Amino acid sequence: MKHTSVAFGETISSNVLWAIAPMRREDLPAVMAIENALFSDPWPADVYRRQLQTSYTFYLALWACRGTEKTLAGYTGGMYYLPEAHLANIAVAKPWQGRGLGGLLLLAFLQEAVTRGATEVYLDVRRSNITAQDVYRRFGFSVIATRRRYYNDKEDALVMSRRLSPPAIAEALRRQWRFVQQSALPAA
Ligand SMILES: CC(C)(COP(=O)(O)OP(=O)(O)OC[C@H]1O[C@@H](n2cnc3c(N)ncnc32)[C@H](O)[C@@H]1OP(=O)(O)O)[C@@H](O)C(=O)NCCC(=O)NCCS
């Protein structure tokens, strides 16, 4: 794989090189495979296609690279309404979860938000999605409101947010890259 387009860093853990790069239109089949596997109400590919064409959005893809092979392990993205950013989506494919990659993607999004001038970030999360809430809390988010019966199936959304301090985000991202580097990997 060529790494010239890697915008947000990379690290090597065992034989895997992890790379975060802006999501591209040609990544969408791999994105949709993860989206459909993980979400009960997946976004259609058209929504992602439109998001990628919009100037106030930004999407990142996380790649696991082994030799010449690369596999999409996760993605995240959202919108910027400065001084606010809104994280719309984050996902890590099942086999890769629990190794710090969700945290890595989250911090990469926060870093991008800081770079674009955002000073606070908001997101919605299902009340039942404790795993995601725990990850958000670990990285400084807290619940500020509830949207009652927000989702199509009438589940509540919790609104979580955090303020952004550029040096703190940069340091947390550096630490998370190190954490991922040291995490155990499944057999190739
Ligand atoms: C939510 C999601 C993205 C998290 O991805 P992930 O890769 O499993 O997340 P991480 O590995 O970074 O975090 C999981 C655990 O790893 C460990 N971990 C991660 N970073 C760590 C660090 N720096 N130090 C120590 N432990 C760490 C923790 O045990 C953490 O759990 P905790 O936050 O409850 O303590 C993933 O579960 C997912 O894709 N879910 C389905 C889609 C979804 O629900 N998206 C959110 C929609 S709002």
Image: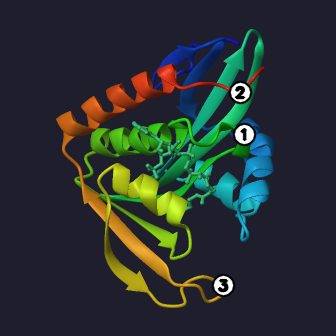
- Residue shown at 39%/83% (left/top)? 146
| Residue 14 versus residue 85 in the image, above or below | above
Which of the pair 109/182 is nearer the observer?
A: 182
Where disc 1 sits, the SS reads helix
Which residue in the protein does label 1 denote? 95
Query: CA gap, disc 3 to disc 2?
Result: 36 Å
Residue 188, percent from left and from top: 78, 20
In the structure shown, which secondary structural element does the residue marked by tag 3 occupy? loop
**Earlier along the polypeptide chain: callout 3 or callout 2?**
3
Q: Is mark 2 within 8 Å of ligand 1?
A: no
Where is residue 64, by image quadrant?
top right
Residue that appears at 44% across and 58% down: 134
Contact between labelled residues 2 and 1, with CB atoms less than 8 Å apart:
yes
Tell me what residue is drawn at x 37 percent, y 40 percent: 112
Tell me the residue that label 2 is attached to.
186
Task: Confirm if mark 3 falls within 8 A of ligand 1.
Answer: no
Q: Please tell me which residue is depicted at 39% across the width and 73% down the height of the picture.
A: 159
Who is closer to the viewer here, 82 or 120?
Answer: 120
